[in-house]
Amino acid sequence: KAGVTQTPRYLIKTRGQQVTLSCSPISGHRSVSWYQQTPGQGLQFLFEYFSETQRNKGNFPGRFSGRQFSNSRSEMNVSTLELGDSALYLCASSIGPRDNEQFFGPGTRLTVL
Amino acid sequence: GEDVEQSLFLSVREGDSSVINCTYTDSSSTYLYWYKQEPGAGLQLLTYIFSNMDMKQDQRLTVLLNKKDKHLSLRIADTQTGDSAIYFCAESMNRDDKIIFGKGTRLHILP
């Protein structure tokens, strides 16, 4: 069974640009969560989607948004990029929102110059 | 507010036991997790424990929970070079609640 895949794996953008990251969950998993990982802040929860609906949201500004499609694939978008947005963005999928075990993808490394 | 604290680094000799400690502030945390992140990879759930349990053992891993002190530990017996990774402690209030992570403890194995 294929794991969680994230594309692209690496991305370089400049301040002010916008970026879209993609996550394909494990087949059969309907819940997708996004996390931002930085050396200073560690791993922080961005949002969670289930059945195309955002269920939970972390404390990030409105520049961070996401969506989920009917096939459970999810995208997150960051607009007006700032230097501080440089991070590893991790996506995790689970069977449903009440499933303790989340399976993480390898992440997308975003560098903002 | 919710907060999870853990030390950033731990060095252990190969073959010894590793003990990674974590404290959390939210007394209503119901689920407590340990995740492992190897270089260049995402996080892998190692184990989790319910707040009504004191201990959980799974092969070389032992999780101890002191709910009174809000202290969680992960013991890895007979530490191997393959255990070298960052270990994240995490908590959530409910099964379908967001998971709050600590900053991770980097485990370094000495030969």
Image (cartoon, grey):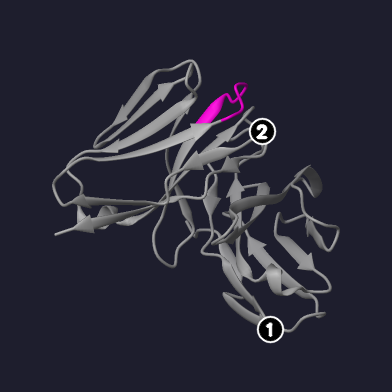
The Cα–Cα distance between marks 2 and 1, rounded to whole angstroms, is: 36 Å
Query: Which element type, helix, strand or loop, lies under badge 2?
Result: loop
- The secondary structure that dominates the magenta segment is loop
| Dot label at residue A37 | none
Q: Position of residue A57 (x, y in %)?
A: 77, 46
Read off the chain for label 2: B
Q: How many marks?
A: 2
Name the kind of residue labelled 2 in the image. Asp
Instruction: Give the residue number, with chain letter if any, for mark 1.
Output: A113
Residue B68 visible, this angle:
yes
Residue A46, placed above or below residue B73: below
Name the kind of residue labelled 1 in the image. Leu
| Label 2: how many Cα within 10 Å (few below 14, some 14–19, many 20+) | some
Q: Which residue occupies 60% across, 22% down?
A: B27
Instruction: Give the residue number, with chain letter if any, for mark 2.
Output: B96
Nearest to the observer: residue B26 or residue A45? B26
Q: Which residue occupies 49% across, 59% down?
A: B42
Residues in magenta, as a range:
B25-32
Nearest to the observer: residue A86 or residue A65? A86
Tell me, yes or no, whether dots 2 and 1 are on the same chain: no
Q: Position of residue B31 (x, y in %)?
A: 54, 28
Asked if the residues shown at circle 2 and circle 1 are in contact, with their CB atoms under 8 angstroms apart, the answer is no
User: Magenta segment: does it hold B47?
Assistant: no
- Relative horizontal placement of residue A55, taking residue A9 as reference (left or right): right
User: Magenta segment: does it hold B29?
Assistant: yes
Q: Quadrant of the C terminus of chain A?
A: bottom right
Read off the chain for label 1: A
